[in-house]
């Protein structure tokens, strides 16, 4: 549907929302708009925003797409990035909607950076060159000017290099993941329905796949508390403070890793999420 049609359908309640979706092209990412509908459309209508001559309207930046979406009355559209590393949990995502609204108020990148320094939730130090560099990377990604590759270095863990078996606990086998930056090292659990023999086989013969699986899971799954048999009642400032593992791998996960060829690291994101 064209912009005018979409405007009319929004204001009669036929359009309930919109998504701005990234699509790869030979010249970098482009963007299309897909509408969510209250009821199915007649067959001669498309749920995509289209140009007058027909066919999806292609935007070169996410901000241009968002401007059209908001002009028809959808104030809180979703944005779907489809880069190859989209499995990484973006800890800066909460800033993006705010950033995307600033260009409509006449803010360029430098003014948005200034806004970072006065926003009490951010408090960017403009004299800190490293912090300013990160701020610009976040702004450019939020506005669809980059594909997120530069941002990866700020979304730990970046890479898992090795995994070691530590010990059994009542909540699962505890394993240590070692990362390129030692400050990113973490522990995770493997459920007790996996035999210790099977786990150690995976550690010995499918190490590369396990490292990649652990990287995906660290971004996609939730922490799991456990009781350390060597310190069953950990206290911090007089308060019981049980440790937390980054995530838990299940028997299905381990069987999935076992089926991969030796040295394989080509693991689909859907394999990690499906069994979470």
Image: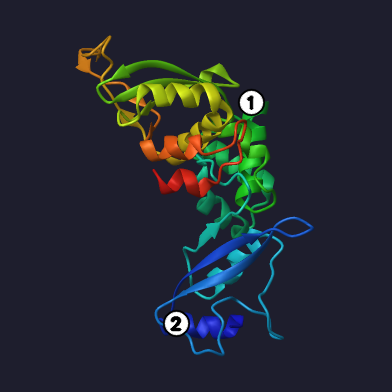
Can the viewer see residue 193 in this picture?
yes
Q: Which residue is mark 1?
A: 128
Work out which residue is located at the far top of the displayed protein and give it: 230
x%, y% of residue 4?
Answer: 58, 84
Q: Who is closer to the viewer here, 148 or 161?
A: 161
x%, y% of residue 179?
Answer: 56, 22
Left or right of 16: which side holds 133?
right
Work out which residue is located at the far right of the displayed protein and give it: 27
Number of disc labels: 2
Left or right of 176: which side holds 225?
left
**Which mark's residue is nearer the viewer, 1 or 2?**
2
Q: Residue at x 31, y 25 (%)?
A: 172
Label 1 Cα crowd, 10 Å radius (few <14 / some 14-19 / many 20+): few
Q: Which residue is mark 2?
A: 11
x%, y% of residue 209?
Answer: 55, 33
Q: Tag 1's secondary structure?
A: loop
Q: Earlier in the sequence, mark 1 or mark 2?
A: 2
Label 2 Cα crowd, 10 Å radius (few <14 / some 14-19 / many 20+): few
Q: Residue at x 40, y 45 (%)?
A: 275
Left or right of 261: which side holds 75?
left
Q: Residue at x 43, y 82 (%)?
A: 14
Can the viewer see residue 122 in this picture?
no
Q: How is the image coloured?
A: rainbow
Residue 265, picture quadrant: top right
Q: CA distance from mark 1 to mark 2?
A: 47 Å
Q: Tag 2's secondary structure?
A: helix
Q: Quadrant of the C terminus?
A: top left
Q: Who is closer to the viewer here, 72 or 24?
A: 24
């Amino acid at each position: 549907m064209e912009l005018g049609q979409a405007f009319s359908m929004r204001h009669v309640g036929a359009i309930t929302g919109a998504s701005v979706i990234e699509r790869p092209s030979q010249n970098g990412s482009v963007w299309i708009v897909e509408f969510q509908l209250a009821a199915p459309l007649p067959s001669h209508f498309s749920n995509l925003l289209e140009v007058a001559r027909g066919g999806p309207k292609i935007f070169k930046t996410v901000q241009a797409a968002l401007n059209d979406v908001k002009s028809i009355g959808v104030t809180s559209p979703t944005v779907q990035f489809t880069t190859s590393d989209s499995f990484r949990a973006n800890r800066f995502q909460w800033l993006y909607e705010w950033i995307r609204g600033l260009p409509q108020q006449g803010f360029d990148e430098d003014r948005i950076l200034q806004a970072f320094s006065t926003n009490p939730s951010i408090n960017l130090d403009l004299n800190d060159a490293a912090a300013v560099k990160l701020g610009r990377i976040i702004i450019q990604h939020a506005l669809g000017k980059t594909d997120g590759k530069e941002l990866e270095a700020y979304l730990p863990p970046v890479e898992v290099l090795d995994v070691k078996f530590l010990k059994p606990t009542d909540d699962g086998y505890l394993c240590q993941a070692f990362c390129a930056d030692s400050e990113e090292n973490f522990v995770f659990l493997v459920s007790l329905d996996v035999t210790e023999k099977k786990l150690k086989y995976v550690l010995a013969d499918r190490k590369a796949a396990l490292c990649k699986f652990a990287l995906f899971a660290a971004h996609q799954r939730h922490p799991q508390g456990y009781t350390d048999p060597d310190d069953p009642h950990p206290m911090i400032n007089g308060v019981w403070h049980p440790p937390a593992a980054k995530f838990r791998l299940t028997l299905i996960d381990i069987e999935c890793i076992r089926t991969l060829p030796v040295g394989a690291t080509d693991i689909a994101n859907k394999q990690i999420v499906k069994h979470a």
